[in-house]
Image: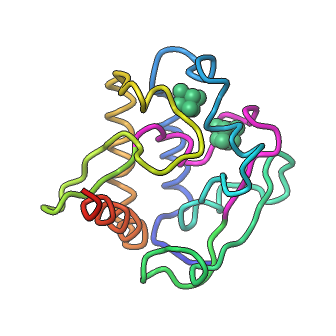
């Protein structure tokens, strides 16, 4: 498994910080049938990439997640990523132990972007998704506390060189497409 520098206690602190915020002050799953969670029911490629070391705060025997291991050689990962990474899928979406949602779920619908000047920004997630997120489509105004907490989290996470490389790779791909 690839090893980043982000420690277990940092992931715990990040989860605690993000537990206190939500993108909007209501359950956005009610407007779309929890599209981002339930897409895994019909699309095998939908799942959640755990960040390097994020697996340390999860129980691989817990009954709500299916675990798979991806080789960084077979999929598009940064050149610095050598080895395997964990990819998880929920067994009963949209139901999950909320306090254990991975970071990918917690910071959606935003995504981190590093500009050419090296500045971290948050943007609406622009990945090619097999479902429509109304919040992304309509660029819904998000709770400033959620935005601030998400920014703080990504600012911290990109101190880990592997996570920086991942965010930078996606950012460069975006700039290239523009
Ligand atoms: S984040 Fe978007 S797709 Fe997911 S439940 Fe909320 S509105 Fe729906
Ligand atoms: S962990 Fe929870 S929020 Fe994330 S995809 Fe699974 S059901 Fe949805």
Q: Residue furthest left?
A: 117
Q: Which residues are magenta?
A: 87-110
In the image, is residue 40 above or below residue 28?
below
Would residue 44 be counted in the magenta stretch? no
Q: Splitting the image into 4 quarters, where does residue 60 fall? A: bottom right
Image quarter (top left, top right, bottom left or bottom right) of the C terminus: bottom left
Q: Position of residue 54 (x, y in %)?
A: 59, 60
Vertically, is 56 above or below 62? below
Task: Give the color scheme: rainbow, by chain, secondary structure or one colour.
Answer: rainbow
Residue nearest the viewer, comparing 134 with 67: 134
Q: Residue at x 32, y 42 (%)?
A: 123
Q: Is residue 100 visible?
A: no
Total labels drawn: 0
Q: Quadrant of residue 167?
A: bottom left
Residue 118 in the image: state x and y as whole percent: 18, 62
* Residue 59 in sight here: yes
From the top left corner, tell me how far across and down residue 76 is, in percent.
Answer: 51, 74
Q: Quadrant of the N terminus?
A: bottom right
Identify which residue, 89 or 103, lies in the foreground.
89
Asked whether residue 88 is drawn in magenta, I would say yes
Answer above or below: position of 57 versus 41: below
The image position of residue 141, as x and y in percent, is 34, 21
Residue occupying the point 49% across, 26% down:
134
In the image, residue 90 sits, relative to residue 141, either above or below, namely: below
Residue at the spot 66% in from the left edge and 53% down from the top edge: 47
Residue sitting nearer the eye, 130 or 37: 130
Instruction: Find ligand 2 in the image and state its quadrant.
Output: top right
Which quadrant of the structure image shows residue 32?
top right
């Amino acid at each position: 498994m690839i090893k980043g520098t982000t420690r277990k206690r940092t992931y715990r602190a990040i989860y605690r910080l993000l537990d206190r915020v939500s993108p909007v002050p209501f359950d956005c799953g009610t407007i779309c049938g929890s599209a981002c969670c339930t897409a895994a029911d019909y699309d095998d490629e939908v799942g959640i990439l755990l960040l390097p070391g994020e697996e340390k705060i999860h129980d691989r025997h817990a009954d709500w997640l299916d675990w798979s291991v991806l080789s960084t050689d077979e999929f598009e990962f940064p050149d610095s990523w050598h080895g395997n990474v964990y990819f998880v899928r929920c067994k009963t979406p949209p139901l999950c132990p909320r306090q254990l949602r991975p970071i990918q779920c917690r910071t959606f619908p935003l995504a981190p972007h590093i500009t050419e000047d090296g500045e971290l920004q948050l943007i609406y997630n622009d990945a090619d998704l097999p479902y429509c997120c109304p919040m992304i489509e309509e660029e819904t105004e998000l709770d400033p506390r959620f935005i601030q907490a998400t920014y703080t989290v990504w600012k911290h996470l990109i101190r880990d060189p592997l996570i920086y490389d991942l965010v930078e790779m996606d950012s460069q791909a975006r700039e290239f497409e523009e």
